[in-house]
């Protein structure tokens, strides 16, 4: 829920918008295919270290309950 | 929540012409000044280049918006899930509730993990803030701040303090933690940030010395903890800012914010400049979170979707939604590798999404009311969720 900015038709607002858009339009961008493959590569490199993804044994996860040990 | 105007209109003498009347609180070179609306217009008019009028500015603004869309569209050569078709599906997850943290007397609004991967801090609507040991469920510290809603809390990188954002006082304070359980920590509370509306989010930057806050007054701000001085302010949102997240990248000096104006913005912390803006959501953005590499971020919204934005491609690259999900998403966080996205919803469940294949992998049930926050532990071994049902759950 937002209130309408009361001076949306003002010169000050319009100038700010134009300046902001000029900056945003001029940034350098890369293709989605390249960006996606980079994200995939990051996931691949770090997947084996991700405990929630891979699941680690109870003995290594302090939050999982360990099986009771018997003393021989 | 967003029912207060964020422009704090005050009444008094104008800083420019001296006439008494209703004033606009604006920032010139980061200094707050109060000008009457006439002087604001005069200042803007003087700043116009030769030949510029309101009409030419509007036209230029429309042209630029179209150009921006075109440029972004040119690079959209393929969808993320198409590129991800060749990788393996995520295996069955064995994530279950391992701990239930009970102790709050009202809705738990926020939580944060400590860097030691076992402690966490949580805050609730009854003003109680509790520091827990996640392994033993021991309550290490507790602070009671009556007459306030603690809407945001954050652990300091050193583990020696917590920052709290007030919903009613409009302040963000820092409390040093003590080993002495009996010490009354409320007396050591130090106010750092002052906004003109509720503080919705707070986080420490790389050290205990600075905090970044987001507020219902539409701005974000960077503060020095020691002196309480405002170091930088960030203006651009046109409604309440509900969430912010700091870039995890070591060279990054940026953060992302999202709010009730349905926009998410990326900011340069040093200059205060808004670098990129994304307007795809159809309702309030409740939470924003960076992807672990820092090249992308996810947002959760009341429009029942979560979206992934790639910063280098400068566009939305995935929408996580299902026809059966109709309730708003309140919070998101990534697993350590970034492959899984955990999202908490107002239908009391947590959906686990495959970030790359854009499919849902699992649903975590257990909470008995809305999820207010989900947060993965620093080493990725566990997920903590905070809920309006007065409890927190640790999943692993």
Image (tube, rainbow, N blue to C red):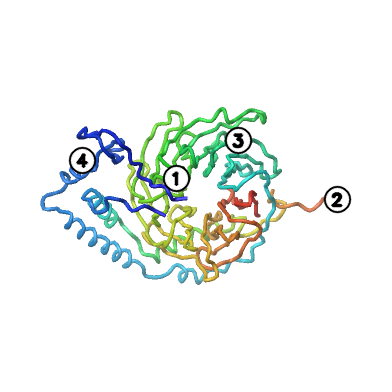
Secondary structure, mark 3, is strand
Q: Mark 2 lies on which chain?
A: A
Indicate the position of residue B21 as horizontal and vertical percent values: 26, 37
User: Which residue is tagged 2?
Assistant: A70
- Residue B250: image tag: 1
- Residue B39: image tag: 4
Between residues A4 and B188, which one lies in front from this camera angle? A4
- Quick check: marks 1 and 4 in contact, CB under 8 Å? no
* Same-subunit check for callouts 1 and 4: yes
Q: Separation of disc 2 and disc 4 at Cα?
A: 82 Å
Q: Separation of disc 1 and disc 3 at Cα?
A: 36 Å
Please say whether residue B179 is visible from this viewpoint: yes
- Residue B144: image tag: 3
Task: Tell me which numbered mark, 3 or 4, is placed earlier along the sequence.
Answer: 4
Asked if residue B54 lies left or right of residue B293, the reply is left
* Same-subunit check for callouts 2 and 4: no
- Few, some or many residues within 10 Å of mark 4 (<14, 14–19, 20+): some
- Few, some or many residues within 10 Å of mark 2 (<14, 14–19, 20+): few
Q: Mark 4 lies on which chain?
A: B
Task: Tell me which numbered mark, 1 or 3, is placed earlier along the sequence.
Answer: 3
Task: Tell me which numbered mark, 1 or 4, is placed earlier along the sequence.
Answer: 4
Indicate the position of residue B386 as horizontal and vertical percent values: 60, 50
Residue found 11% across the figure and 53% down from its top: B51
Indicate the position of residue A38 as horizontal and vertical percent values: 44, 60
Q: Separation of disc 1 and disc 4 at Cα?
A: 43 Å
Query: Which dot, 1 or 3, sits closer to the camera?
Result: 3
Query: Which dot, 2 or 3, sits closer to the camera?
Result: 3
- Residue B238: image tag: none
- Few, some or many residues within 10 Å of mark 3 (<14, 14–19, 20+): some
């Amino acid at each position: 829920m937002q209130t309408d900015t009361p001076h949306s038709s003002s010169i000050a607002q319009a100038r700010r918008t134009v300046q902001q858009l000029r900056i945003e339009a001029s940034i350098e961008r890369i293709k989605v295919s390249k960006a996606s493959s980079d994200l995939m590569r990051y996931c691949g490199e770090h997947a084996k270290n991700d405990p929630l993804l891979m699941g680690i044994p109870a003995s290594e996860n302090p939050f999982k309950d360990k099986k009771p040990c018997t003393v021989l | 929540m967003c029912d207060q105007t964020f422009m704090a209109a005050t009444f008094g003498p104008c800083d420019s012409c001296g006439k008494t009347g209703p004033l606009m609180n604006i920032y010139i070179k980061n200094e707050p000044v109060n000008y009457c609306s006439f002087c604001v217009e005069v200042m803007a008019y003087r700043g116009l280049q030769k030949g510029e009028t309101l009409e030419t500015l509007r036209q230029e603004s429309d042209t630029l918006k179209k150009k921006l869309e075109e440029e972004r569209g040119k690079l959209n050569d393929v969808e993320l899930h198409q590129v991800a078709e060749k990788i393996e599906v995520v295996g069955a997850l064995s994530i279950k509730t391992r701990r239930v943290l009970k102790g709050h007397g009202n809705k738990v609004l926020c939580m944060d993990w400590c860097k030691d991967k076992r402690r966490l801090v949580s805050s609730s609507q009854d003003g109680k803030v509790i520091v827990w040991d996640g392994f033993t469920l021991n309550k290490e510290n507790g602070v009671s701040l009556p007459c306030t809603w603690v809407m945001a809390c954050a652990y300091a990188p050193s583990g020696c303090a917590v920052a709290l954002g007030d919903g009613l006082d409009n302040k963000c304070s820092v409390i040093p933690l003590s080993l002495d359980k009996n010490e009354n920590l409320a007396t050591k509370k130090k106010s750092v940030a002052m906004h003109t509306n509720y503080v919705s989010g707070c986080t420490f930057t790389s050290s205990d010395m600075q905090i970044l806050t987001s507020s219902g007054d539409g701005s974000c701000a960077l503060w020095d903890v020691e002196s309480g001085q405002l170091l930088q302010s960030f203006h651009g949102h046109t409604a309440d800012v509900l969430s912010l997240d700091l870039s995890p990248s070591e060279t990054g000096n940026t953060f992302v914010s999202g709010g009730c104006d349905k926009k998410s913005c990326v900011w340069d912390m040093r200059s205060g400049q808004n670098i990129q803006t994304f307007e795809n959501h159809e309702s309030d953005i409740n939470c924003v979170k960076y992807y672990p590499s820092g090249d992308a971020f996810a947002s959760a919204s009341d429009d029942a979707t979560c979206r992934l934005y790639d910063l280098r491609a400068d566009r939305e690259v995935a929408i996580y939604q299902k026809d059966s999900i109709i309730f708003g998403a309140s919070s998101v966080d990534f697993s350590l590798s970034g492959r899984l996205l955990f999202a908490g919803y107002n239908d009391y469940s947590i959906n686990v999404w495959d970030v790359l294949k854009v499919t849902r992998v699992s649903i975590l049930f257990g909470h008995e009311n809305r999820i207010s926050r989900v947060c993965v532990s620093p080493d990725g071994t566990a997920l903590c969720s905070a809920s309006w049902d007065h409890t927190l759950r640790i999943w692993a």
